[in-house]
Amino acid sequence: MGTETSDIIDILAGIEPGSSLDGIRARRLQARENAQKSYLALFEPVEFGDVAAAERYAVAAFVAGIHGEPAATGFYLAELAKAADKLAWADALKAEIDRGRTEGPYGAFPVGPLSVEDKAGLIYRVGADGQRALGARLAAVLEHAHVLVFRPRDASPAAVQALLDAGWSTTAIVTLSQLVAFLSFQVRAVAGLRTLGASLGHQANAAAKAS
Amino acid sequence: MTDSIIVHDNKNEPVVFTQDELGWLPWLEPFPEADLTERHWAGLVDKSRAKSDYFRLLVRDPEILEARTKTDKDIFYNTADGLPRAERELAAAATSRYNGCIYCASVHARFATVHSKRRDDVQRLLDKGVGTDLGARWNAIVRASVALAATPIAFGEQHVAELRSVGLDDAEIVDVINSAAFFNWANRLMLSLGEPTKGSDA
């Protein structure tokens, strides 16, 4: 490994400086740099405003966890541990990730011709232990995050109202929506690049054997 | 806290996927245009976006909006040595169709049509869904996008192999990954903060 990278997508996808994928990503430099700036804007913002650092990492760990992405989940749990002394949160998040795992997307379309495509699935609620450990405020975000990850077409004004009722401001809801939506992008960029990288490795190995 | 949701009597909610121009109604109060500061203008990137309720809602957190917008623009508009714009828009439209974002699908289906001139194929994707046959190259891009949109993520080496078999090189495959992954971000913003409506502009 050459120079250290601090690019989170590269780190999570295992892209080494100087590798073929590193070169390809460099050709979309503004996208690469702004994906990283997006991460920084969400997790190391100018001002945390109404969403604390620990809350941001906790939601991110949950979102990565319910996607079944262990590297990203571990990364955000480690950042949570650095940001705050929240051992009880980490345990509760792991339990809630197990309770929340399912397969998506599912949910309902507006009533009409698309209704034949409606698909039922888990309506996730944070468990009693999770509510106690995480508090109602954070629990409300996890429930909303689960809707966004698995059944985004079920999002509704009532779901936004539930966040307001839990004490979140309009601006905080915008930040939290960005955070969950960004994570949904980040884990997919990572998974896609990691898969492509692995296939390049296999190709290189096959070529080495053939020659 | 005096914050509250906005409830719309939306009689014109679209109930099918369409290439028509749609409007978008926010569920939370957009930031007032008259109060925008320099920090907000930087977040909007394009001045014209101050007219959009969607962007004025997102600009409540300016830094993430700015970075998101610049990521978006490079993934879709920077076509140097890479996948044609039409196929990036196809990946965005297929992702939106699969996740169920009628608004996002309308915008990017329209762009896919403009850049590919294959309006009927694009419409079939909207009408029949992501399993419809669009020819080998488009099928490969749609399948890869859908696999990436699934949770847990179902994108595997078979999708890379299929994209290679229809002629995409590694850089073009990265463009598919970026375009499709990005729409999992966009879909969740549009779907969770407001609703589409027929006719008026967002």
Image (cartoon, rainbow, N blue to C red):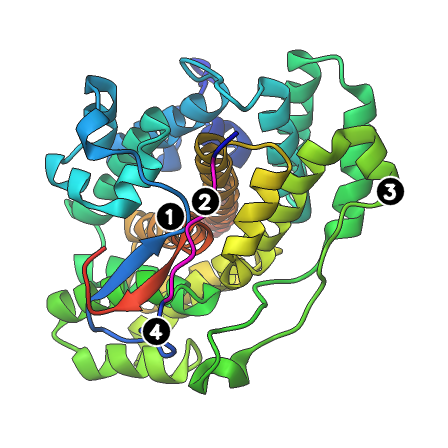
Local SS, label 4: loop
| Residue that sits furthest to the front in the current view | B2
Q: Is residue B161 left or right of residue B164?
A: right
Q: Which mark is residue B182?
A: 1
| Foreground pick, B89 / A159 | A159
> What residue is shown with label 4?
B11
x and y, in percent, of residue B19 in the image: 23, 73
Left or right? Give the position of B88 relative to A181: left
Amino acid bearing label 1: Phe
Mark 3: which amino acid?
A: Ala
Dot 1 or dot 4, earlier in sequence:
4
Do labels 4 and 2 touch, CB within 8 Å? Answer: no
- Which numbered mark, 2 or 3, is in the foreground of this view? 3
Closer to the camera: disc 1 or disc 4? 4
- Residue hosting label 3: A128
Instruction: Kindly identify the residue that appears in the image at 32 percent across and 27 percent down.
Output: B62
Q: Which of B115 and B32 lies nearest the eye of the viewer?
A: B32
Q: Is residue A184 above or below residue B162?
A: above
Label 1 SS? helix
Q: Which residues are magenta?
A: B3-9
Can you tell which mark lies on residue A185? Answer: 2
Tell me whether marks 2 and 3 sit on the same chain.
Answer: yes
Q: Is A103 inside the magenta-drawn segment?
A: no
Left or right of B180, for residue A195: right
